[in-house]
Amino acid sequence: MQFPTMDPMTSDLATIPGPTPLASGIPPIRGDFPTLCHALDYAATGRTGFNFHDARANLVRAYPYREMREDALAVARRLRGLGIAPGARVALLAETGPDFAAHFFGALYAGVLPVPLPLPTSFGGRASFIDQLRQQMASAEPALAVSPEGLLEMVAEAAAGLCPALSWRQFEALAQSDAPLPAPDPDAVAYLQYSSGSTRFPHGVAVTHRAVLANLRGQDSAIRVREGDRCVSWLPWYHDMGLVGCMLAPMAGQLSVDYISTEDFARRPLSWLTLISRNPGTTISYSPSFGYDICARRISTQSDVKAKFDLSRWRLAGNGADMIRPDICQAFVDAFADAGFDAKAFTPSYGLAEATLAVTIAPEGQGIVCDLVDERRLSGATGEPAASSPDRPVRYRAIVDCGVPIAGHRVEIRDDEGRRLPDREIGKVFVSGPSLMVGYFRNEEATRACLGADGWLDTGDMGYMIGDHLFIVGRAKDMIILNGRNHWPQDIEWAIEQLEGFKPGDIAAFAITLPSGEEAPAVLVQCRASDPAERTRLKEVIRAKVRQLTGMRCIVELVPPKTLPRTTSGKLSRSKARALYLAGEIVPLDRAA
């Protein structure tokens, strides 16, 4: 494969004042490279790059790909100077900024596997964060951990006995080796991506350069990236959507990107939309449903959004990483239509780290399309549903169309015996294609449990197909099975959210075993009410709502705000909430009182 030749180290491109421009100034190549190193080599010959902004969407640092490549090569030579051999791992705290970017690509140039690790969140505290880092580092066995200065103490504690820990600046002071760097290998593992779920038994997803580039090409083709596109992101770089979709993909397509940190977004969510409005040409930005939800909630119904925001150029509003909520999407449209946001810009998708990132993406301009499914089908009923009656009308759930498989990939729905199911039959989602992981790092048992010898991956998700379009209904492991019926925890949680005073993220539903041996649904609900009588009333209202939905009584526990555990990407962790509740580590308000 031949690429236009231009040495970015000796380029006469002038220092770029302000943010990097829309146009790269070089012929576009959309991810068609052998490795990520080749992709950065080429992007560095142009004018585009990363741009980092503060919580008020003001530019703090422009970081052209040319400069990033220079810094990355220096990092690679320092890794060589430390004697860290190709194939070893280096743990990197995934701070949104130039340091992480340079160290990530520097590890790639050195043939070392970067391992992005999460930043602290507002959930769990210091001890929980250190424990999570230690578990992931124990799995990856890195030769070195590098972090921002302010986190070095915690990182060093987590790495004690495992590997040395340095800050960005301490690493920068190390000597560079003049030994030649290894030639990039397309079939070598590029990096390890740890899922945002379990911290006790973390799974490091290992993907090759070839697999990453296959996924990036598939994304590019599906969303029809074009000259002049520009991206904006607040997504964390330790999550697959942030790392692959909003860091690696724009670089491999020579696009400029504008970033605000996840922490700044959490404090000032509307800065995301300010950044989209402020930078001419911004056309692409992704978020899980909760990002759209928090922005719609933050904007006042009396605000003049037309004066504050211009979202008319936003042609691709990606939506994925969790269950896509059509009601949240509609609320966002209602809140920002006057600012020029087009509902057809919504682009639902489905993916997972085990497939690098994207598996399916909705066609451009389709928007949110829903299929109404009888809840009796979702509960596992077979045969023709019985006729409804006035006292028990049929209830439907709107399932969002997550699009069609990206180029080179296939999706099948299978039953418990592995047989392929026809359209509209709910079963397990299986995926095959060139961007699947090699496996979980040094965990053959977990790899065999989901990745078959035939190259098909059991995603652990449940869904169905209509033609080539995929519809996701939930996670198989989260399903609540009571008296032979399936109940999706999302349905119970969403029903409670409709009650006054509750919002997304306040509720965790799961099944528990009673002392009698019977299974029962349990619901943990974050409650802000302090009056005991009001709490009693809320519990009865919640029980009635769940009974209406499931036909069963449930255990309702009110817990303090900020009690329910989250994954590193901010999603509710039902399995961890259940484990903490059963272990007595989540104490309901009435017992605490």
Image (cartoon, helix red, strand yellow):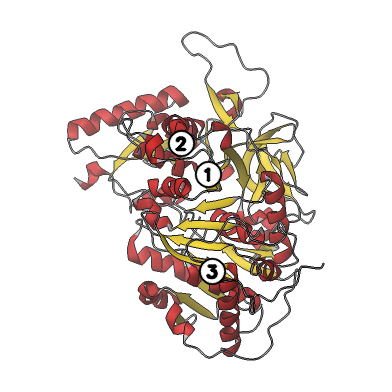
Q: Which residue is mark 3?
A: 101
| Contact? badges 2 and 3 (CB < 8 Å) | no
> x, y (%) of residue 246?
56, 55
> x, y (%) of residue 54?
38, 59
Tell me which residue sits at (66%, 24%) in the image: 382
For badge 3, the amino acid type reads: Ala
Q: Which mark is residue 518?
A: 2
Judge from the rendering whether residue 226 lies leftward or rightward of residue 72; answer left or right. right
Q: Earlier in the sequence, mark 3 or mark 1?
A: 3
Q: Which residue is mark 1?
A: 322
Local secondary structure at mark 2: loop
The Cα atoms of the two marked residues, 2 and 3, are separated by: 52 Å
For badge 1, the amino acid type reads: Asp
> x, y (%) of residue 368?
58, 32
Q: Residues within 10 Å of mark 2 (few under 14, many from 20)?
A: few
| Contact? badges 1 and 2 (CB < 8 Å) | no
Judge from the rendering whether residue 354 lies leftward or rightward of residue 327; answer left or right. right
Q: Residues within 10 Å of mark 1 (few under 14, many from 20)?
A: some
For badge 2, the amino acid type reads: Glu
Quick check: can you spot residue 93? no
Quick check: can you spot residue 12? yes
Local secondary structure at mark 1: loop
